[in-house]
Image (tube, helix red, strand yellow):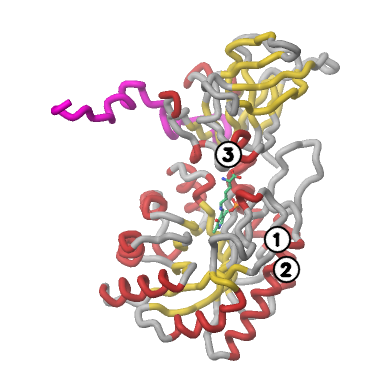
Amino acid sequence: MDHFLYRNGILHAEDVPLPQIAADVGTPFYVYSAATLTRHYQLFKEALDGIPNLVCYAMKSNSNQAVLKLLADLGAGMDVVSGGEYLRAKAAGVPGDRIVFSGVGKTRAEMELALGGGVRQVNVESEPELELLGQVAVSMEKTVPITIRVNPDVDAKTHAKIATGKSENKFGIPIARAREIFGRAASTPGVQVIGIDVHIGSQLTDLAPFEAAYLKVAELTHRLREDGHDIKRLDLGGGLGIPYARSNEAPPLPMDYGALIKRTVGDLGVEVEIEPGRLISGNAGLMIAAVIYVKQGEGRDFLILDAAMNDLIRPAMYDAYHDIVPVAEPEPGAEQAPYDIVGPVCESGDTFTKQRDMPPLTAGDLVAFRSAGAYGAVMSSEYNTRPLIPEVLVKGDHFAVIRPRPAIDEIINRDIVPEWL
Ligand code: LLP
């Protein structure tokens, strides 16, 4: 469910008509709904009700300060994967004891940052990382709580570029070696083993891979306890998928996912953490673009938009599907025609979709890309010297720019021409 609905023939973000925002900030832009973000966070809280839990929003999906503050104020924890994200979480007011530090390549500087500012736990992903973290903690005269991320060798049945739980992926330690490596961690000064971490991939549309992974983690919990480890926390990762196409079958709901968690690990007497990103922010955002030209090509027509692959890279990178709808609702029964919908960037990969049926559109018309709140703005670039597009947050009948569009001069002036040139 989201809060982007047609009213009187115009697509709204909550109570704000999108053409009003377009007139104010120009196109293209991202727009997020506060009510949808809130609702999605609460769905997870409701789903995990009854077991001790912390929902740690995976801020890599959308890390705007306003989005973080909204979720932090609701009580969310944060899953961070870099020093930059750690500082962003802190800047949004998230206390250290609600920040989980994930990632396969943490540097010494990042460890020092997290230990200095406070961290709920570090999710360790390898033996060399364990060793370095221990050294850093000892040198800072601290003991850092850790989980160790296991790679359960489960096929998440998602796009290969976002699957993380197979043994060939770079993530986690092989589950078969877990007892040995947990043993090593127990005798590593500076770290305190408190639990197990697992994350098998993103945009999962079936619960079976989660179930397979969580059962392995439950089994491992028993074995590690037999070995004398005090396993009191399980970080079960993120990854629950969202519906990208309204016509398709909907993926499982957070409530079903919560029931699965309770069924698989609920009787272990552990505290559960989850790290959802996409499900919280994905359908809470749209990207709005305007049509620049309708171009007749050889045997196909193109809708050339003012947004491009640098603004929303998911179609080019993962062949991802996004619903694209006109902001002005088409008349019922309006005739549709197939278009290739493209941006102005100078490569053919700058194609959002091919031969998509669309109602009649002309230059200046606005279109909305749905499900663009996650991995949209955060993955954008300035390729072709196209400024990062603004982000707007809507709450009820008001909206605010939460990241402005930079002037081209700001971009040019970041470069430095050496005086000796
Ligand atoms: N936890 C860890 C350790 C992760 O690596 C990720 C995502 C998440 C949580 C959040 O997963 P989510 O709930 O959002 O599925 N750029 C790609 C997605 C990359 C996901 C990377 N890791 C895309 O646009 O589809």
Q: Residue at x 61, y 66 (%)?
A: 236
Q: Which mark is residue 155?
A: 1
Q: Which residues are magenta?
A: 394-421
Instruction: Quote the CA–CA distance across marks 3 and 2.
Output: 29 Å
Instruction: Quote the CA–CA distance across marks 2 and 1.
Output: 9 Å
Q: Nearer the viewer, mark 1 or mark 3?
A: 1
Q: Which residue is mark 2?
A: 212
Say which element carries label 2.
Answer: helix
Q: Where is residue 96, by image quadrant?
A: bottom left
Q: Is mark 3 within 8 Å of ligand 1?
A: no
- First along the sequence among labels 2 and 1: 1
Classify 334 as above or below 94: above
| Disc 1 residue crowd, few under 14, some 14–19, many 20+, Cα 10 Å | some
Q: Quadrant of the C terminus?
A: top left
Q: Which mark is residue 373?
A: 3
Regarding residue 21, the answer to whether it shows in the image is no
State yes or no: residue 3 in magenta: no
**Residue 276 picture location, percent across and down:** 59, 55
Q: Are marks 1 and 3 in contact (CB under 8 Å)?
A: no
Classify 414 as above or below 330: below
- First along the sequence among labels 1 and 3: 1
Q: Residue at x 41, y 51 (%)?
A: 85
Judging depth in this view, the residue of 294 and 400 nearest the camera is 294
Regarding residue 149, the answer to whether it shows in the image is yes
Q: Residue at x 50, y 39 (%)?
A: 379
Q: Which amino acid, mark 3?
A: Gly
Instruction: Quote the CA–CA distance across marks 1 and 3.
Output: 26 Å
State yes or no: residue 401 in magenta: yes
